[in-house]
Image (tube, rainbow, N blue to C red):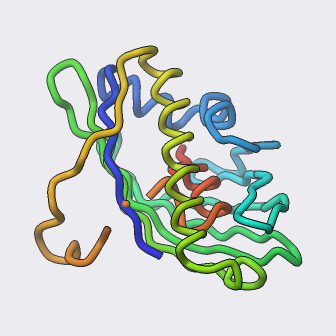
Amino acid sequence: MRQMGEYRLGAPRQRVWTALNDPEVLAASIDGCQSLTKTADDAFEAVVRARIGPVSAPFTAEVKLADVVAPESYRLIVNAKGGAAGFGKGEARVTLAEEGAATVLAYEVEGQVGGKLAQVGQRLIDAAARKMADDFFARFGEAVAPGASEKTTPAAPTGPGRAGIAPWIALAVAAVLAALAALVLRR
């Protein structure tokens, strides 16, 4: 599964970066988040109850940060396990660009799922992941810049390594996106 998305947040880039690294802000932004714990300077663990079609379960996600360029970008590596419900794993690239007094947050996610989740069907998984990402960014945007954030339409991917990528939220499955979207978990 591949997704990408872009959101315009009505706040300076440094404020957005700080919020992306605040476990309290992230936990409040993730629907179904039961806990979010920083386990190292570059790692988090999240427990998120997610529902995709008929599959509903708590997922434990380990999120590792890589290629951190504060306050501009980082890469998230997510492994999520939901017991009998299955698993999800993936990577997300998050970038922050200044646009006047606002910040454009863009993400690209690639992930895969297994177990019962894989039996649900790609279309349902994609729709659930998109909804989770949209819900996460709506809440996150309200926390960072109340009333001044919106989803935008990103430009077509260009440059090496970007062809064929189509939105994120952290995050291949509900677990990966939620955790990503734990999308987009940070520091």
Horizontal side, residue 138 vs residue 153: left or right? right
Residue 154, compared with residue 157, is above or below; it is: above
Residue 71 locus on image (x, y percent): 33, 38
Identify the residue at image location x=56%, y=48%.
185
* Residue 171 x, y percent position in the rendering: 53, 62
With respect to residue 82, does 49 lie above or below? above
- Give the left or right position of residue 178, taking residue 39 as reference: left
Q: Position of residue 2 (x, y in %)?
A: 41, 72
Give the tally of numbered discs: 0
User: Where's the C terminus, which quadrant?
Assistant: top right
Q: Residue at x 61, y 67 (%)?
A: 173
- Which residue is rendered at x = 25% and y = 78% of the image? 164
Most distant residue in the left direction? 159
> Relative to the observer, which residue lies in front, 122 or 109?
122
Residue appearing at x 79%, y 67% in the figure:
54
Task: Please determine whether, in this image, residue 8 is positioned above or below residue 108.
Answer: above
Q: In the image, residue 132 lies at what x, y percent?
A: 58, 50
Residue situated furthest top in the rendering: 146
Taking the image as shown, residue 181 lies to the left or right of residue 8, namely: right
Q: Quadrant of residue 180?
A: bottom right
Q: Quadrant of residue 152?
A: top left
Q: Is residue 164 above or below residue 130?
A: below
